[in-house]
Amino acid sequence: METGLNSESPNKRGANVEPKVGPFVPKTDRNPRDLRSWAKRTGFVSDYSAEAGTSGSEKFESFQQRGRGSSSSPKIEIDPVLGRMRDNRGVEIEPASHGGVGLEENVRKENETEGERKVGFRGNGGNGHGVGVSAVAPVTEEKDEEENVLHDEVKVNLYDEEGVEPVDGEWKGPSELKCGLTENPGFVSLIYYGLQHYLSLAGSLVLIPLIMVPVMGGTDKDTATVISTMLFLSGITTILHVYFGTRLPLVQGSSFVYLAPALVIINAQEYRNLTEHKFRHIMRELQGAIIVGSIFQCILGFSGLMSILLRLINPVVVAPTVAAVGLAFFSYGFQQAGICLEISVPQIALVLLFTLYLRGISIFGRHLFRVYAVPLSVTIVWIYASFLTAGGVYNYKGCNPDIPSSNVLTDACRKHAYTIQHCRTDVSDALSTAAWLRIPYPLQWGFPIFHFRTSIIMVIVSLVASVDSVGTYRTASLQVNSRPPTRGVVSRGIAMEGFCSILAGLWGSGTGSTTLTENVHTINITKVASRKVVELGAVFLIIFSFIGKVGALLASIPQALAAAVLCFMWALTVTLGLSTLQYGQSASFRNMTIVGVALFLGMSIPSYFQQYQPESSLILPSYLVPYAAASSGPFHSGLKQLDFAINALMSMNMVVTLLVAFLLDNTVPGSKQERGVYVWSKAEDIAADASLQSEYSLPKKLAWCCCWLKCLGV
């Protein structure tokens, strides 16, 4: 490509013929430092546009790195695909540094003094073999004031905090990771960040049993045992997923996705009046349903069907589905937290203060309030609640907190029994009854019970959990500055989640195991994405699960305090789900309509099914009535098993939302850019890049044994 920058003089080419550089010739009425006028002449796009399919920020990067008037030190370039530093791309034209001299005069002077020079390209190669040509513009020495004006006029965001994903497949993720995916930050840092990851996820890991076990009729000791089992399974499944799943630094654990179907099964009509061994019987029923649903999830992943399904799962489907998981518990949230306003209101206010108002405060270089918002606020309010209990706030004349509410005989104490049970910090006997050392083991509650009606519920729920995980995989890959995984890697991750949920069913945690969405938020805050950090934290979690007193301590959290924390956790789940819309055109009328209709029908249709009152002499708490619709819903086919399953599924918000969003997004016309279609990497991308092989490929020995599983990206 000839650029006119050669050693021949203009006279040899013809008389009075000047070399012309069309779009870059400065005009008398234009300031060459005016970026906007230059952009109009050259077609430069100042900011990324999802409609255009090309990144203007990349062009501005080349212009900015050449045009600062400083050529003494090279600028570090970031690969726009992987977000990593790349080598210099050959010799490039240096900008002119003479403010009052035109471009043509500068070209002549360089030709006379330096002779012929080669033009470097910012394309696929650094030797001039690329496709694109560097943009060259006259740049003069800029003063500080002029530089500020220039940046005020045109703002180009190269790397957004949450990552930017162009629609043409090119990816740009967040930079400045403290520790990459395959890096080792050191033993001390491994311990610190490992514990930090799981402390920040304490709400998701331990609060679900505080809701489920009391409803199942379990004791405080049973609650402590289930919490210890969940800690053990979370550690084991996280290690399995990091080694054999997607290999992303994602924590596995009990998810809120499984909480609603568990409450539906718990409130089945035949279980309401059980008195003897009620907890064990319901737990065995849950175990059987989880195992069947997990087997379906394994088949979905190992057979390669997930790769086909991925073509139909996009942000417009993922966003409302995940949001509905959090919105489903609005009837439980503040209704339970409001029993003790003196505890719940300070808890909600404190966690919001830490996460929103104090998030920018750094102590010893650590954003402690952002990372430890939940455990810090819980600890402070728990101590405060202990002072209230010791001070006699919940002492009622003639009422003994050690006597269960069912044994209270006087009417005065019966009024305050619920408050005593939910607000006092000394009503739980978990610490006194739990053993110091206890190792969770399979079938600890008995052999699982298998029924068609509960199994079909968990099969559909496992599909919802898979959709949730697909969005988490995509977001996590952006956070760790890597290409998105291939469809085979995603299928492998879903298959491994199914296997981990089978383990959860065998051990009896009450819920399946899936990827915790909150983990991505922790990676974004800490900027630590090392697999070794998550693995070491999982080892600590396993060790803590063997200490029975740890689970007992967590089980003694007052229920009103736990409900207040869950109000924040469920709200965070909603926002994390809706944030997925950033990968499509969120302002599109098509997308807004689909998301709005899916969320509205996902709340309204289950409300229709939940209005049928349960047929039972036992009065259920108001927050459990919506989950009793499965036994008395409007669908009647004559087959009790099928009636229960259909009424249960249609009474769950996330299931209805998924069905509506999935149907509309895949039938309503829309471009790929508008829909934000997920662009997954290809197998040849991993084969050609050694760094990607270390990120997503299985360990060599295992990959050799499973080389026939092409659908899993081995």
Image: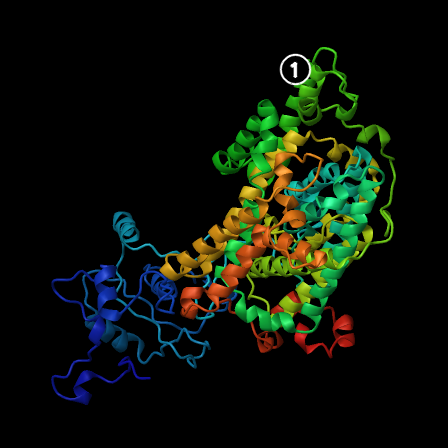
Q: Is residue 367 visible?
A: no
Q: Position of residue 354 (x, y in %)?
A: 54, 34
Q: Is residue 100 left or right of residue 440?
A: left
Residue designated by label 1? 393
Image coords of residue 438 (percent x, y): 87, 41
The foreground one among 611 and 487 is 611
- Kindly identify the residue that appears in the image at 69 percent across and 18 percent down: 389
Judged from this view, the residue extending furthest toward the front is 638
At 74% from the left and 73% from the top, the residue drawn is 703
How crowded is the residue under tag 1: few (<14 C-alpha within 10 Å), some, or many (20+)? few
Quadrant for residue 475, please give it.
bottom right
Q: How is the image coloured?
A: rainbow
Quadrant of residue 343 within the rendered picture: top right
Nearest the eye: 200 or 332: 332
Q: Quadrant of residue 628?
A: top right
x%, y% of residue 507? Answer: 82, 51
Quarter of the N terminus within the rendering: bottom left
Q: Secondary structure under badge 1?
A: loop
Image coords of residue 144 (percent x, y): 29, 48
Q: Residue at x 27, y 54 (%)?
A: 142
Q: How many marks?
A: 1
Looking at the rendered structure, the kind of residue marked 1 is Val
| Residue at position x 24%, y 60% in the image | 36
Q: Quadrant of the C terminus?
A: bottom right
The answer to whether residue 331 is above or below residue 47 is: above
Residue pushed farthest top? 397
As displayed, is residue 502 above or below residue 331?
below
The answer, for residue 636, to whether it is visible in the render is: yes
Between 629 and 134, the one nearer to me in the picture? 629
Query: As drawn, is 342 to the left or to the right of 228?
Result: left
